Image (tube, helix red, strand yellow):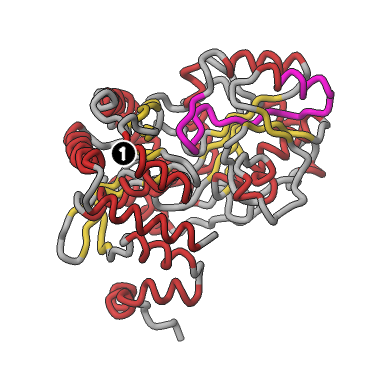
Amino acid sequence: MPADRLDLAALIAERGPERYELHARYLNPQLPRMLHTLGFDRYYERAEGPYFYDAEGNEYLDMLAGFGIFALGRHHPVVREAVRQVMDLGLPDLTRFDCSPLPGLLAEQLLSFAPELDRVFFGNSGTEAVETALKFARYATGRPRVLYCDHAFHGLTTGSLSVNGENGFRRGFDPLLPDTAIPLGDLGALARELKKGDVAALIVEPIQGKGVHAAPPGWLSAARQLLHEHRALLICDEVQTGVGRTGSFFAYQEEGVEPDLVCAAKALSGGYVPIGATLGKGWIFEKVYSSMDRVLVHSASFGSNAQAMAAGLATLHVMREEKVVENSRQVGEVFRERLAALVDRYELLAEVRGRGLMIGIEFGRPRSLKLRTGWTALQAARKGLFAQMVVVPLLHRHRILTQVSGDHLEVIKLIPPLIITEREVDRFVDAFTEVMDEAHRGSGLMWDFGRTLVKQAVGNR
């Protein structure tokens, strides 16, 4: 007898109000605790494009895009229809002993945006794409060590964690792989490590997600040359910066660089089906897959599944048809210019930086005594609390979802859907201006909340 139909709508309607209790009981117990503390424990009911909606129909502007996944916004009709189509086709997916057309077609389309590369491996996530690149680089060069940059983030599985530049993520998971950190932009440090003769590759984000710091102009090109002189490879991690985020399809393309391996994920999914992709030079793939005996030496159980491939194909189709990359570049430039114009106006605002629609807003020590007293108290308790003081009223009062860029950072990172227009820019800048006006009064609800954060930070020590 076939199973009865699962009525998801009824299940969500019945059990949805328990969402935070369910998570606290069965999943990560600290997530609902953190959300309750910040007042971020909202009940979102639906989403479309760059907006969420709660049960009362209130509209929230999304400046996170699911940490960069929803480049096309939520529920783009073309991607949604493609996933429906591929499910209705009833394809003989993942037979293991055939070559489905969809992975080849997606690889062909993806490489058309990166003609300097030759082949693609499809996995299921960004960290899996990084793991693939690390394995391929080690095998292709016959060397064990991979260099990475301070403050880098490349994922949280063991291999990618080994090249993670944030100690908070690494602590307690040692021993990791034998990899070494260097400062972003430091050619001297790179040269010193390469002289040891055991380096397989350098992995680098062209723009770091933690803090939104770009590699200095010309550094990637010089690093690649130095790496190749020592028979080592350049891996560009474009999991967050890639697929249009920075105003070019891949961020490294702005530097005129040809990496040996490139990691992509997040936005390629269209927001529907997880996917990771490792693009690379043909000779590297041909060395890894050197004989029929090695045909499955690196594979992924769900890699290249039909739903993910359809979502990826639809995403790239929309990117071309709707000129999404161009929109990211143009709207991003307007966005940064409008925010940068506020730096001279607000002494707590130190810098606005980024590229395309990847923008970092950094706060810094104010000049006036009144503001400096409050700032110093926050910094003594825990660095990053002022940025959190800004994020909270943006959501509570203006219904705009943002994030602090990383632990102990006074930086807000904006990575909205790439389809936003100047309408969304106006909404954010108006709200941000109002929040900064209140912050510079040195009193009020923001600073009351700041004192609460200080007490919690001190209590957690």
Q: Looking at the rendering, which quadrant does residue 276 occupy? A: top right
Is residue 209 one of those drawn in magenta?
yes
Q: Residues within 10 Å of mark 1 (few under 14, many from 20)?
A: some
Q: Residue at x 28, y 55 (%)?
A: 448
Please name the residue that numbered disc 1 is placed on: 371
Name the spot of residue 439 as percent of width and height, x first.
25, 42
Q: Residue at x 81, y 19 (%)?
A: 195
Three-letter amino acid code of the residue under disc 1: Leu
| Along the line of sight, the residue nearer the viewer: 209 or 394 | 394
Furthest residue toward front: 369
| Along the line of sight, the residue nearer the viewer: 324 or 80 | 324
Image-based side of 160 in relation to 75, left or right? right
Is residue 236 one of those drawn in magenta?
no
Answer yes or no: is residue 424 visible: no
Name the spot of residue 31 as percent of width and height, x first.
45, 64
Q: Is residue 31 above or below residue 68?
A: below
In magenta, the rendered stretch is 190-214
Answer yes or no: is residue 55 visible: yes
Name the spot of residue 187 as percent of width and height, x first.
66, 17
Q: Residue at x 44, y 71 (%)?
A: 23
Furthest residue toward bottom: 1
| Along the line of sight, the residue nearer the viewer: 348 or 355 | 348
Q: Secondary structure at mark 1?
A: helix
| Along the line of sight, the residue nearer the viewer: 265 or 293 | 265
Q: Residue at x 66, y 43 (%)?
A: 131
Q: Is residue 23 above or below residue 257?
A: below
Name the spot of residue 135 as percent of width and height, x first.
73, 40
Q: Quadrant of the C terminus?
A: bottom right
